[in-house]
């Protein structure tokens, strides 16, 4: 561990550009804290309260954020590569252009999250709630989204190359001009989904057939 701040009350604290790499921030209250550009690489933030915190451009690579509360947090341009966000609550969070490559978001709540242009390459999103999320232009290539809830998600122009979507719920999702070559949609629900202009070359469709 780096700094020892377990369970501390840092509500609305000003920690812009702070170096908290490897810090123990488990169960710390950082609600509304200012952490723009902060270095939180490898930090321990399990069950931390980060709702409405400003983490613009922060470095959270390999951070442990299991079950953390990030509702409405500002993570625009943040680096969350390889971070553990299993069960985290990111409802309504701002993750525009954030780097979430290889991040673990199993069963995370990303309902109505703003993920336009985000890098989610090889991210683990199985059983995550992405309903009504904005994933327009996001890179979801080779991401695992089995059993994910993507109802009414905006995935316009998203890159879903070889993405895994077994039994995913894509009801009324917007997949117009999405690149879905080689994606696996076996058992997925595409009721009402907009696939106008989507590239489905070689994709496995819900009934198991391979798209031309």
Image (tube, rainbow, N blue to C red):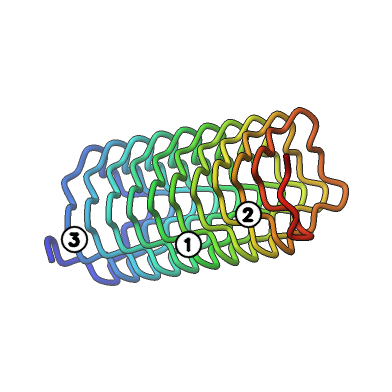
* SS for callout 1: loop
Q: Earlier in the sequence, mark 1 or mark 3?
A: 3
Q: Which mark is residue 1?
A: none
| Residue sticking out furthest to the left | 2
Q: Assign the N terminus to one quadrant of the image.
A: bottom left
**How far across and how far down the image is residue 66, in percent?**
40, 68
* Residue matched to label 2: 184
Q: Earlier in the sequence, mark 2 or mark 3?
A: 3
**How far across and how far down the image is residue 125, in percent?**
53, 59
Give the Cα distance between marks 1 and 2: 31 Å
> Residue 115 sits in which quadrant?
top right
**How far across and how far down the image is residue 24, in percent?**
21, 66
* Residue matched to label 3: 23
Which residue occupies the foreground of this view, 20 or 142? 142
Residue at figure coordinates x 31%, y 41% from the top left: 58
Q: Residues within 10 Å of mark 3 (few under 14, many from 20)?
A: many
Q: Which mark is residue 69?
A: 1
Q: Does the CB distance between marks 1 and 3 fall below 8 Å?
A: no
Q: Assign the C terminus to one quadrant of the image.
A: top right
Q: Residues within 10 Å of mark 1 (few under 14, many from 20)?
A: many
Give the Cα distance between marks 2 and 3: 39 Å
In the rendered view, tell whether residue 53 sits above or below residue 169. Answer: above
Which residue occupies the foreground of this view, 25 or 201? 201
Horizontal arrangement in the rendering, residue 179 relative to residue 22 (left or right): right
Give the Cα distance between marks 1 and 3: 18 Å
Residue at figure coordinates x 76%, y 45% from the top left: 173
């Amino acid at each position: 561990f780096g700094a020892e701040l377990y369970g501390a009350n840092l509500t609305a604290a000003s920690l812009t550009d702070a170096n908290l790499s490897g810090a123990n921030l488990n169960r710390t209250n950082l609600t509304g804290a200012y952490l723009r550009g902060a270095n939180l690489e490898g930090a321990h933030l399990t069950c931390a309260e980060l709702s409405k915190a400003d983490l613009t451009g922060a470095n959270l690579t390999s951070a442990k954020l299991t079950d953390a509360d990030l509702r409405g947090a500002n993570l625009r341009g943040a680096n969350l590569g390889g971070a553990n966000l299993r069960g985290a609550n990111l409802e309504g969070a701002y993750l525009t252009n954030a780097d979430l490559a290889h991040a673990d978001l199993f069963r995370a709540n990303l309902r109505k999250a703003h993920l336009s242009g985000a890098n989610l390459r090889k991210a683990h999103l199985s059983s995550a709630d992405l309903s009504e999320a904005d994933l327009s232009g996001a890179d979801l290539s080779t991401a695992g989204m089995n059993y994910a809830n993507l109802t009414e998600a905006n995935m316009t122009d998203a890159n879903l190359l070889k993405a895994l979507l077994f039994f995913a719920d894509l009801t009324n999702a917007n997949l117009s001009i999405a690149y879905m070559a080689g994606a696996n949609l076996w058992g997925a629900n595409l009721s009402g989904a907009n696939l106008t202009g989507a590239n489905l070359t070689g994709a496995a469709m819900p009934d198991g057939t391979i798209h031309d």
